[in-house]
Amino acid sequence: MLTQVNQGRLDIFKLVDIMSKKPAMIFGINGRKGDLRVGMDADFVIVDINREDVLSKEKMYTRSSANVYDGYQVKGSPILTAVRGKTIMENGEIIGKSGYGEYVSSELIQSKS
């Protein structure tokens, strides 16, 4: 998606909207996810918009067996990922502890409102 931003096919703000804000709204968890505001979980990714890389299945952390992006040349790459404000990935290396994530349901959000 960052490659599309670099190629001028997608606006960076639209990317944030379709990859973060909209899914949180669709799943009813936008009271806690999808934005950076006081009271939110502080999940975020910092990217180097100019960093070029080649994707490899060895570095893709997914449960899917489909590796359609293996070998794909990209421009723009995440360099840091934080979950609830805690760094879990930095420069391609997972540094967070397994199990730190937390399941969030729309029912949980609504019951706190």
Image (spheres, helix red, strand yellow):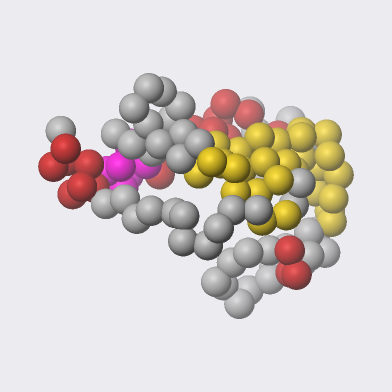
Query: Which of the 4 quarters of the picture holds residue 51?
Result: top right
Instruction: Pick whichever, 60 or 75, lies toward us.
Output: 60
- The quarter of the picture where residue 4 lies is top right
The single residue placed furthest to the bottom in the displayed view is 65
Q: Position of residue 77 (x, y in %)?
A: 74, 43
- Judge from the rendering whether residue 19 lies leftward or rightward of residue 51; answer left or right: left
Number of numbered callouts drawn: 0
Residue lying farthest top? 38
Q: Is residue 4 visible?
A: no
Residue 102 lies, with reference to residue 48, above or below; the image says below
Which residue shows up at 74% across the image and 69% down it? 57
Question: Which is more toward the observer, 104 or 11?
Answer: 104
Q: Position of residue 85 (x, y in %)?
A: 50, 36
- Magenta stretch, residue numbers: 24-30
- Which residue is at 57% across, 26% downward? 13
Is residue 54 positioned above or below 86 on the image? below
Q: In the rendering, at what x and y percent does residue 3 appear?
A: 75, 42
Image quarter hosting the C terminus: top left
Which part of the image, by quadrant, shows the N terminus? top right
The picture places residue 23, in percent across and down from the top left corner, at 40, 44
Q: Is residue 71 left or right of residue 32?
A: right
> Residue 34 lies in magenta, yes or no?
no
| Residue under the image location 65 percent in, 49 percent down | 89
Q: Residue at x 63, y 28 (%)?
A: 11
Residue 28 in magenta stretch: yes
